[in-house]
Amino acid sequence: MEIAEERIGDVLVLRPAGRLDGNSAGSFERALLAQIDSRPARLVLDLAELEYVSSAGLRAILLAVKRGKSVNCPLLACCLPEHIREVFDLSGFGNVLPIHASREEALGT
């Protein structure tokens, strides 16, 4: 898995590409938590290039949401492919973090 990052003002956008599974979840989690600890005003996960997410990947995102809340760094997601959106909906992640249809929408909140 590769993670591209981009700063837009005081917002950090992370764009993971590939599979977020048991093999990549640990490194993804560490990278995500390190970015949250740098305290951007908001962190947006642009998931347009995410091919697959497992329960280990969802756990990493959940831990990041909790860490973000503890340091006042809201975490948002955007651009979920339909199959990833289904996983988020079935697992209740729509209640865990805000999900936006587009990056522009996520940046505007």
Image (cartoon, grey):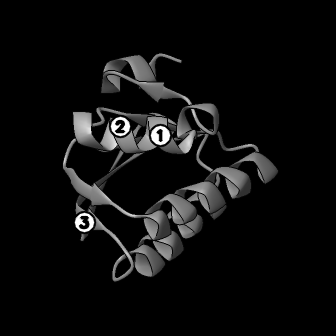
Q: In screen coordinates, is 19 left or right of 88?
A: left
Determine whether 24 is above or below 98 in the image.
below
Find numbered disc 3 in the image and state the secondary structure of the residue it sits on.
strand
- The answer to whether marks 1 and 3 mark residues whose Cβ atoms lie closer than 8 Å is no
Residue at 55%, 40% (x, y): give it: 93
Determine whether 66 is above or below 78 in the image.
below
Q: CA distance from mark 3 to mark 2?
A: 16 Å
- Residue 83 lies, in percent from the top left, at 25, 41
| Crowding near the residue tagged with mark 3, few <14, some 14–19, many ≥20 C-alpha atoms within 10 Å | some
Find numbered disc 2 in the image and state the secondary structure of the residue it sits on.
helix
- Residue 80 lies, in percent from the top left, at 30, 36
- Residue 37 lies, in percent from the top left, at 65, 63
| Crowding near the residue tagged with mark 2, few <14, some 14–19, many ≥20 C-alpha atoms within 10 Å | few
Q: Quadrant of the N terminus?
A: bottom left
The answer to whether one can see residue 45 in this image is yes
Q: CA distance from mark 1 to mark 2?
A: 6 Å
Comparing 44 with 11, the one in front is 44
Residue found at the far front of this picture = 90
- The answer to whether marks 1 and 2 mark residues whose Cβ atoms lie closer than 8 Å is yes
Q: Which residue in the structure is indicated by mark 3?
A: 19
Residue type at numbered disc 1? Leu
Q: Which residue in the structure is indicated by mark 2?
A: 86
